Amino acid sequence: MGDCHGCGSSCVPPKQAAMHKLVAIIGPPNSGKSTLFNRLTGLRQKVANFPGVTVEHHTGKADLPGGHDVELVDLPGVYSLHARSEDERVSHDVLHGKMPGLKRPDGVILILDATNLSRHLPLAASVLSLRIPTLVVLNMADDMRQRGGAVDTGALADELGAPVVLASATTGEGVDEVARFLSGGIGVPKPVELPVLQDVPACRQWAREVSREAGYTHPAPPVWTRRLDAVFLHAVWGPLSFVLVVGAVFQTIFTGARPLMGGVEWAVGAAGGLMRAVLPEGVLRSLLVDGVWSGVGAVLVFMPQILLLFLFITVLEDSGYLARAALIADRTMARVGLQGKSFIPLLSAYACAVPAIMATRTIENKRDRIATILIAPFMTCSARLPVYTLIIAAFIPDRQFIGPFVHTRAAALMGLYVLGFAAAVLTARVLKSSILKSERTPFVLEMPPYRVPSWRTVGLRLYDRAMAFLKRAGTVILGVSVVLWALASIPLVDGKAPPIEQSLAGTLGRAIEPLIKPLGFNWKIGIGLVTSLAAREVIVGTLGTIYGMEPDKDSAGLQAALQKDLTFGGAVALLVFFAFAMQCMSTLAVVRRETGGWKWPAVQFAYMGALAWLCALAAYKVFS
Amino acid sequence: MQLSFKNGARANGPASLADLGENEEGTLERIDLPADFAHRLMELGFVPGHAITVAHSAPGGDPRVFRVDGSEIALRRETARHILLRKQ
């Protein structure tokens, strides 16, 4: 590497401004790759201050000044290019042009953590030796300077034979430079020989020399991270603050979302009233107002709550707190026979089981991976939230429970989350001591420094969730509402819709009534259980449609209608049923894809359904 | 009993990362683990000759966070036991 000192990058004229068509973004975990990717593309993508979250590669188009169009691909965070885990294989394959459907990148943006340069230089050596035009971005430059670190980018560029820029994806520093590279405005110097060694100690030695040549001053340790860890990992304060954080989240989901939900409810009601007034009486009005709008509107009301949940999840992830939570939880995970790595997908399953199951690809051990896939849908996903809050608000009076802070309703919701977690843990225990037995795999987790979450990232993520939610309301829930409306409207009696009991939907509900009667559910709930096989929150829309089509629909909304149809015991049974049952087609589809067959999704569906039925029965017997 | 055993270990210096107390430092000698996993640890900074400091532990003492090469990595005790330290 030292043989190029006579002719550094400065004496090589910039190449003809080459247009990059496909540019790969690569870097170690926690280097802020995804934040930069979001900056450049505006494409919504999950960013987390947590190793192992980005498993699939994400692509997006960068909007560049001058009308250049560059496609970016965000690769999983890796420490090296040795293809050992799935993550590394993806990065390796893309950079070597071996990824099916993706050509070899024309350029690479290599993102390194400026606060810990020497550690990540070996990755730079292996990426640069691929001889793809590469821009080295030293991210988190603001953090490095704040902690007294420094680096001479010119000297580093000479050492590496590649342009180097300091950047901060959070503040936006250096983003212009990256855009300039993408539009071909930064010349790529003559490449230098770099060591790609299997021998890690030798590679490290080289990295240390390069850092020294580049005048790198290692920043002081992050004082605040140490202070916060002294609290969050404290033997007493650690678990206590964990419980407090979780309690606050649930309480806010209930009380904080109230005014917003009231607003949405009012808007939904007003829009329904307007449609009723504008449209002439007839089939179309019945379809739109009683069928579609009652179904879709009933679900829309829960959007503020879901967004609030995602706000908390994103902030906890991006701040670095989740890594500490994983550390605290590791002992529990070890006891049920799972490794700490399983904890990451399980945490994201609180949002949705589908990305969680895809995130299990980071788990190298096949049996551990299957076990994690099988238990992930027990974690309380956000689709359960509308069902839970609707039933809880209808059946559980709002009283103080633990002090003035946590009320009964929030406590009930928390209880359901614990119930799902307990089912997951017990199932894991059973699986890992029987059919999926394997040796314990080691737990290695990097603790990223605490960071103030980037509000831009949080905003993008919430926007993304809101769009996904609306899309579901506009497709699955709308479709089910239309079908249900049709089923509830035939056979026609005297040219009019029949009483709902005598309609096709009512017949269907009655047909399965014997199966669910022991659980305290009637045929109306039965229809909801059938439609919710598509997705859990569909039951809310279904009940909205069913009650919307009843003649005495002036009753005070869904809650009041539900109170007529369910006893307290039946309500608890319904909650328990939703906690355990596998009512999600997307999850079954992704399990089939990830496990390569119908065997595991079938096992999962049967097991979860049987557990749901038995536990709901027990709950009904106990609470009646 | 426990104490005297601990003192015994101290006499020869700590044998592995698991023997270090909070804020204590040791120099890595070798990693006594399967090659693939040892390689992964080395990429994270667990390189022979490097200094490693014990930072915080999870409540209950396991896993522990180790400060190595400018970053903090959490390992379980069962892993730390196989990361051997240089005799002082």
Image (cartoon, helix red, strand yellow):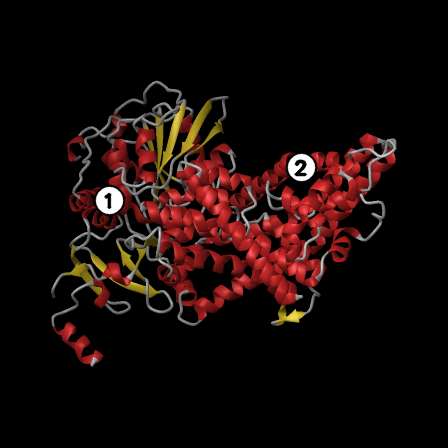
For the point 19% across and 75% down, which residue is it?
B6
Please identify the quarter of the rendering in which residue A10 is found: top left
Frontmost residue, A177 versus A578: A578
Dot 1 corresponds to which residue? A211
Q: Earlier in the sequence, mark 1 or mark 2?
A: 1
Residue A141 position, x and y percent, is 38, 45
Task: Specify the quadrant that holds the N terminus of chain A.
Answer: top left
Residue B30 position, x and y percent, is 15, 55
> Relative to residue A239, is residue A388 depicted above or below?
above
Mark 2 is on which residue type? Val
* CA–CA distance in space, label 1 to label 2: 61 Å
Residue B39 position, x and y percent, is 21, 47
Local packing at callout 1 (Cα closer than 10 Å; few below 14, some 14-19, many 20+) is: many
Residue A70 makes an appearance in the image? yes
Task: Specify the quadrant that holds the C terminus of chain A.
Answer: bottom right
The image's mark for residue A480 is 2
Element carrying mark 1: helix
